[in-house]
Amino acid sequence: MAMASSPQTLHASFLCSLAIALLRAGRRSAATHLLTNLPSDPPAHLLRRLLPALAYSGLPAAAIRFRPVSLNAALYSYCRLRMLRPALALLRSSSRPTTVAYNLLLAGFSDHGHGRLAPAVFGEMSKRGVPFDGVTVNTILAGLFRNCEVDEAAGLADMLLRGGRIHGLDVVGWNTLIAGYCRAGDTAMALGVADRMMAQGVPMDVVGYNTLVAGLCRAGEVDAAQGILGTMKDAGVDPNVATYTPFIVEYCRAKGFDEAFDLYEGMVRNGVMPDVVTLSALVAGLCKVGRFSEAYALFREMGKVGAAPNHVTYCTLIDSLAKAGRGKESLSLFGEMVSRGVVMDLVTYTALMDWLGKQGKTDEVKDKLHFAVSDNLSPNVVTYTVLIDALCKAGNVDEAEQVLLEMEKSITPNVVTFSSVINGFVKRGLLDKATGYKRMMEERGINPNVVTYGTLIHGLFKFQGQEAALEMYHKMLSEGIEVNKFVVDSLVNGLRQNGKIEEAVAFFKDMSGRGLSLDHVNFTTLIDGLFKAGDMPAAFKFGQELMDRNMLPDAVVYNVFINCLCMLGKSKEAKSFLTEMRNMSLNPDQSTYNTMIVSHCRKGETAKALKLFHEMKRSSIKPNLITYNILIAGLFESGQVEKAKYLLNEMVSAGFCPSSLTHRRVLQACSQSRRLDVIIDIHEWMMNAGLHADITVYNTLVHVLCCHGMTRKAKVVMEEMLGSGIAPDTITFNALILGHCKSSHLDNAFATYAQMLHQKISPNIATFNTLLGGLEYVGRIGEAGTVLNEMEKIGLEPNNLTYDILVTGYGKQSNKVEAIRLYCEMVGKGFVPKVSTYNALISDFTKAGMMAQAKELFKDMQQRGVHPTSCTYDILVSGWSRFRNGTEVRTILKDMKENGFSPSKGTLSFICRAFSKPGMTWEARRLFKNLYKVWNAEC
């Protein structure tokens, strides 16, 4: 039976507990006064509770009144808490310090990265006459090596040996020197120390040999390490698991898995069982080369050989799987870690955050960061950057900026952090903000890298044009930053999207000629651009070059060929590429099938599209939301309502909720097929199937209804929208205004505009263009001045469409003075008129008999890259026929034929009437002979 505590012990325990409570409450004076009532030699278990509390509170004086052994305990507590300054002060205040006390303090300096201060403390120790021992020397050497003070450590050891202060280093001291040189990467000196050690009669133990083996393996000197292993065995020292593990780690790093597993099997045969470090090294090596199945199988075997996976093993596997895009498996292992109580590190959390961020799951990214902080892990620059990148990719740039501000309170962002923020602003088209962050990082001494510049070049091409993008490119070169594949892709993509495919090809060839290793992505971008520019021979030529470089086309390259051939209407050729793709053992994916399906739907070949859809499912390729959207829209467009509804049901059964994109495509398809009767029904069906009713959905419905002049129904929808708590915006009112204009109810359109202003909803350029279009449609273009004044009031400038409407409107009203004035103003601002605008002007001049001016406009439109239509030619043919100018008519007819057009029946009738007049028989025969050739060619 346990003995009861004495009253003195109970009293001391009570006082100790009360003192600790006072210290935690910050009442240090009261606690110090209370401690004076404690005996000078309280029980050891009370001291173990009290001393850390005193150390935390910075009360060394209160600690040293207890029995002498408590000085060492107090020093140990201070050192464990990294409170080295109070520890030193406590030791200095002691009148009788011991060797052990100084050794404890020196160990504290060494363990917490202040080993370079140890020699000074050692000097103070000597001055106070405190003797030192082997532990003292070994601790000082270890601290210096840990701080990479290699020369100082070696110098101190030599000084002590030469000065006779010590008779010689013991085996621990020699091992410390060997470990220090190995840690510094100086294996030659480490081997030299081992030779000196044995020369002085100190035999090496297993720790020394293992240290040498590990150092040589880290330096990649495996053969030398094998030599040490042989020497070790000859000396009768048995290798252990720590001997073999460095070899296995190095073999895995060099991808020598056969050697690693041979050594592993050999060590097991020799009776040396692997530990968790050995097996974790093998798991990590397999993960590095993507052999996840083998890594996972080995991971599951670990527990069976008595080496259960630790947090390093779990973290390695989780990190590798997440980076390989297998985040679901990572999350499963993460759950297993939690259930087993395995401690997680920041790398694990960061890897999972990165994968979740790439999936767009920003809320879950923030949750993982919260869990990391609750596990007392401090986020580092990588963790914050992963969160910022995830927010930027999800479009939450404002929140990303807030995280950046929070981060800067304790951590300095790096180039990757700023590049992520810049990318976020570029994606939203906010180039001023993006370039502002570039300036900010430069002001802070963080130089933009090639990724930063590549991102900005891509954004400038997209939103500010070629000139700004190329200026940024040249700035990058002036900063001495070399072009990489990412920048090449940004420039080629930007140039080809700006219609500069020849410059893109020249740049691509230049980069290739300079020895830059271009990859599949670079070739795919250029090939795609060439296809879309209509240069099929060049596209196939670069495809051949890709193969000549031993870069076999992958699924993405084939998808580009298939997509571009489909866009050019060459379905048969696309189908042959699909067959060749399979012959190359490449599996078509969702993108491949979606491309083929959309091509058939565009041509109204829904039967062929459905056949591909069923083939896709038979090939175990699950249709995605894009597949269903394409097919459903195609079926509605072709009027196959029941089949479309069936696919809508199948889509929902497959787990896809209709999205706002599905809604828009389906309603537009119903609109194009004139199935106005099903628009409201389909909308309501989608709502019941889980469509989230937001402003986009309601605006789509209102717009489709208004496009067909169904403004009454649109107003009902708007009331329903208001009832759901969704306020109309500019797009909603623009749609209503369009509906009134389509119905020729201009007064209602302007009343809706007034209502819009009354509700403080700002009109945009589309609002005014719609109103102007309505005026032009009903022949009231003369009232355009009022609309233009409204535009000017709110600071909006006319755009290309504004001028097209105005010029066309005045042209139709035969107001040539105003039409030409606006035309000159339009082209003077760099706008290019549409072909319909030119047609209106040319028609007005031909009606007035001003054929010279009409001919001049015809030349001007061609010089500006605007291609005439059949209507343009008909207008000119009719105009010249009116003047019975056979020469000009023949010229226009020839040009018309070369461009693939034929005169309309009305134009033919006009020619007949014009040239059947008396005296025009010969000219009529010539013209009809020419027309016969045209029609014969058409037939």
Image (tube, helix red, strand yellow):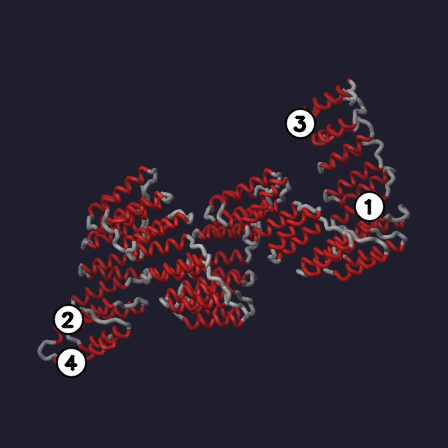
* Mark 4 or 2, nearer chain start: 2
Marks 1 and 2 sit apart, C-alpha to C-alpha, by: 111 Å
Identify the element where label 3 is drawn.
Answer: helix
Residues tagged 1 and 4 counted as in contact (Cβ below 8 A): no
> Which residue is the site of mark 3?
24
Marks 2 and 3 sit apart, C-alpha to C-alpha, by: 105 Å
Quarter of the figure that contains the N terminus: top right
> Which residue is the site of mark 4?
925
Q: Amino acid at mark 4?
A: Arg
Identify the element where label 1 is drawn.
Answer: helix
- Residue 192 drawn at (x, y percent): 83, 57
Q: Amino acid at mark 2?
A: Phe
Marks 4 and 3 sit apart, C-alpha to C-alpha, by: 115 Å
Q: Amino acid at mark 1?
A: Asn
Tag of residue 910: 2
Marks 1 and 4 sit apart, C-alpha to C-alpha, by: 116 Å
- Residue 224 drawn at (x, y percent): 78, 61
- Residue 491 drawn at (x, y percent): 47, 63
